[in-house]
Image (spheres, rainbow, N blue to C red):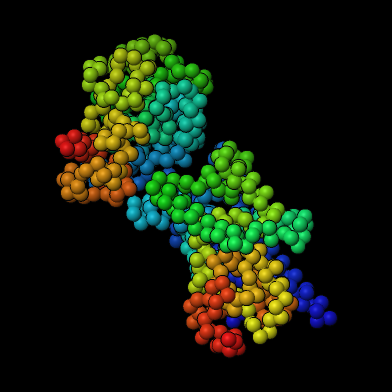
Amino acid sequence: MKAKTAGLGKKSGRKARRIVQIVFFVIVAVTATGGALKEKGITIPVIPDASLHSICPFGGVVSIWQLLNVGTLVKKVHESSLVLAGIALVLALLFGPVICGWVCPFGTFQEWLAALGRKIFRKKYNTFVPTKLDKVLRYLRYLVLAWVSYMTAVTGKLIFQDYDPYFTLFNLWTGEVAVTGYIALALVVALSLFVERPFCKYACPYGAVLGIFNLFRIFGIKRNAPTCISCKACDRACPMNIQVSTAKVVRDHQCISCLECSSEAACPVPATVDMLALPGQVKDTFGQETAKAGKKNLGGEK
Amino acid sequence: MKITYKPLGVFVVVLLAAGIGGAKLVGLWKTESTKQPVAIREGEFAGMPNPLDIRGSYTWDDVARAFNFDVELALKAFGASDPTTKVNTLESIYGEASLPEGTEIGTDAVRLFVSLLTGLPHAPEGSTILPFSAIEVLRTEGKASSEFIEEAAARAYTPGAVQGVPATKSAEPATDIPPATGDSPGAPAATKTSAVAVPKIVQADLPASPVFDAATPTTSTTVHTPSPAKSGGESTGEGAVPGTITGKTTFKEIKTWGLSEDQIKSTTGGEIGHDLAAIRDWASSKGLSFSEIKARLQALLDAR
């Protein structure tokens, strides 16, 4: 009976994230469609009609340099992007890249494709990329971020639009998408059948920005080692392939705060993997612990 | 304090909603440009709207309202019929036409038109030209001096001479626009075009620029030399030769060409823009004459 109740709790917890993801996907899809229709001179009452750029926080991020130096926003970016970037910043400081795991519609889209990939490859899904190669590729998104930031600063234009599968997804029909955008989207769709969230892992420049907050976020994923049974269920559940089972505090730059590894979802032991406040935590990346924090917060484990 | 799915989800949604709502309350939530160009900051035209800030997302109505003129003038000038259409549609209208290589009728053409119509300063891009219909409007309504209007006329695109422009759009203004000087009202477009009184300028005066070479077919022997003017004539575009200042030249570029900060400041009255700012944009934002600064800087560069 208890097990049944716990199972139901896990389902409802996950369901909460799914609902939030669907809501934001619909909001963005409807808004972007309304915006594109408005560009074509068609206005539909009730439907919001902002452009996709105006509701993308990354536009605010890449505009900061130009805003500080020239006093203007990058072309096509509006003040709303700055507002969203600010909110995302607050969320990231508190919970890490929660925008990626809960809000980003392109992450949601990749998760839906992952469900299909899981049906095809079952347990083999999301294990195809060799660990060593994968580890290196994870830093590719910082190169993308550096390139996008530099080019946007130099040209004053949203240079990433032509390569952005996210923009492509919501503008497929508008005629505004470059060939490179279609190629990028096709590549992400194909890869998503083998790897979970490939764009987030290897190429998303905004994910790269938010990922840095994993290093000093206030609330983070903690594993209570004394109660851990080392079943590795958390590792298998993590869409970003983070080895939660060997960490005491997850400070991996790729964590998206989806809580899939937590005791509320994958972990079978209550109060073993949870998102908790991390007072005094300075670092604990990739399984390395801070001795002080370990003793204080994790029952004095060595 | 343990954070579980539901509180986290609620917090995320609430913070986003509150953040957006708060931004709306204080007027920070803007998902489109205000359609009100920024004002020129300094100089003779300080406080006036800056033609440089006209965006492709402005409608003809927006432009006319912002610069206080009859929208019909803009519609006639560019062959548009719907005042609620965005000005960036020009790019697709004239993009289909075989305009002379290196020339363009787009948003910057609207800026140039507004500048010549209102007398406000604007330095157009080297590749920008106007349709001939706009010249006809400017000749009767333009507040800029006729010298500047004729400069633009010398490079104007003649609809009838170029294939590919949708007939309804290109032909329309030729019959509706006010007659040009010396023309008889109602004359066919081709007749009007050939009757344009364009000042003849000696060929040797022309800068060796592909933009000008390409821009001249419709005016055959009547080409013009851009002179330092408040409308800011320019001779070169993106493919400019190093050492030649164009509308897109940045402060960084002229530094790499050998000018010191002090030399640059001596031409601008003691100020200098950010390295990556285009000199033209910076000058415009300060209400300074780009043409004058450009002439001084070019002289310094040429003297090296």
Q: Residue at x 59, y 39 (%)?
A: A174
Asked if residue B294 can be seen in this view, the reply is yes
Q: Quadrant of the N terminus of chain A?
A: bottom right
Q: Is residue A125 above or below residue B201?
A: below
Q: Quadrant of the C terminus of chain A?
A: bottom right
Q: Is residue B169 above or below residue A38?
A: above
| Occupied quadrant, residue A105 | bottom right
Q: Is residue A212 above or below residue A202?
A: below
Left or right? Give the position of A259 relative to B104.
right
Asked if residue A222 can be seen in this view, the reply is no
Q: Position of residue B271 (x, y in %)?
A: 21, 50
Left or right? Give the position of B216 relative to A163.
left
Q: Position of residue A84 (x, y in %)?
A: 50, 60
Q: Residue at x 17, y 49 (%)?
A: B262
Q: B302 or A49, which is in the foreground?
A: B302
Q: Is residue A167 above or below residue B137?
A: below
Q: Position of residue B8 (x, y in %)?
A: 61, 71
Q: Residue at x 60, y 42 (%)?
A: A182
Left or right? Give the position of B21 relative to B247.
right
Q: Residue at x 69, y 61 (%)?
A: A127
Q: Position of residue B53 (x, y in %)?
A: 37, 42
Left or right? Give the position of A230 relative to A182.
right
Question: In the image as oriented, which residue stretches furthest toward the right?
Answer: A1
| Occupied quadrant, residue B199 | top left
Query: How many numbered marks, from 0 up?
Result: 0
